Amino acid sequence: MGPTSSSAMTAGLRRFKEYPHRTIAIVYDFDGTLSPQSMQDYTVFPELGITPSEFWREVKAVTTSNQATEVLTYMRLMAERIIQGDLKIDRERLKSLGAKVPYFPGVETWFDRVDNFVKDETAGYVKVRHYIVSSGLREILEGVSIASKFHAIFASQYHFDCFGRPTFVDRVITDVSKTQYLFRINKGVEDLSKQVNDHMPESDRPIPFSNMIYIGDGDTDVPSMAVTRKNGGHAFAVYSPGESSAKCETLFKAGRVDAFFEANYSKNTRLEIFFKGALKKMFGDIRYRAMMYTFEEEVVGGKALEA
Ligand SMILES: [Mg+2]
């Protein structure tokens, strides 16, 4: 490559522009991962005068006694409170309440830092996307101040009736069903009206799992962490600064995560250093796969066999 190349790596990479699998996906759980508490605690509950600890205790008790799905239980109990209340809490209101959601240190500048790191290290050859996969509410997440940083937000959704009341659910995301969204990202089937289970050869999947990092706090993340790591990706766990890391330690010892950290996304934290380590490993892997891809194109698809 010519003298315009800024580094040897760039020069090498420019030869392989056509290699398709050079997008990295960073997939975040939300509650407890990017934000300390459940998103409802900051948004809907203050509006309705609900004490979060009491509400979540009730959710646990009802889930147990009804042998129910916990996410459905919280959505039902919350919808009932909204409908019984005097305030109009419709889709628009939920979205505007999203602005109240706070974050762990460094989260607000994290996405631009990661984007710039990937761009600078690979001269723009590798792309990075951020995704949320959450059991929380999409209506709230669409209104959080960092919403524009995400390529897509997958979360549970209410069904609203003609009066704007949440009367049923349109989508429920549980710990197990979270993995469906990893496969959607993997296969590039992000339109939720499309089926994700059709067979697709690995070579047609735009974002291989080896280009994926999953980060969560553990509550609903175990299957996603397992799927990501088992398929060659990376998973990290976080715990609230100053609080117990016991849950993360258990995840680590069970082989669910590469490592775990305090949820501090600021510059030069251990979390950032590990992320950069994983990303650099991916840059190297992508570059090598691109070389193999070009070689195969030359031998199998190209001139070598034409004669
Ligand atoms: Mg969580």
Image (cartoon, helix red, strand yellow):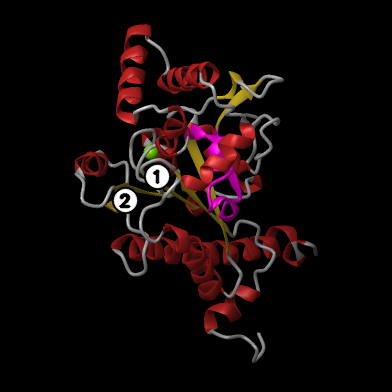
Q: Position of residue 66 (x, y in %)?
A: 38, 7
- Does dot 1 land on a helix, a strand or a loop? helix
Taking the magenta stretch, the answer to whether it contains residue 250 is no
* Disc 2: residue Cβ within 8 A of ligand 1's nearest atom: no
Q: Position of residue 111 (x, y in %)?
A: 50, 61
Report the side of 13 relative to 67 (left or right). Answer: right
Between discs 2 and 1, the one toward the N terminus: 1
Marks 2 and 1 sit apart, C-alpha to C-alpha, by 8 Å
The residue lying toward the viewer, choosing from 205 and 196, is: 196
Task: Name the amino acid type tagged 1.
Answer: Arg
Taking the magenta stretch, the answer to whether it contains residue 144 is yes
Mark number, residue 258: 2
Report the side of 186 relative to 303 (left or right). Answer: left
Q: Marks 2 and 1: CB-CB under 8 Å?
A: yes
The residue lying toward the viewer, choosing from 136 and 246, is: 136
Q: Position of residue 289 (x, y in %)?
A: 55, 61
The answer to whether 302 is drawn above or below residue 260 in the figure is below
Give the quarter of the image for residue 292.
Answer: bottom right
Q: Residue furthest top?
A: 66
Assign the C terminus to one quadrant of the image. Answer: bottom right
User: At 62% across and 45% down in the image, what residue appears?
Assistant: 205
Q: Which residues are magenta?
A: 135-155
The answer to whether 169 is drawn above or below residue 21 in the figure is above
Mark number, residue 229: 1
Query: Looking at the image, in which quadrant does ligand 1 appear?
Result: top left
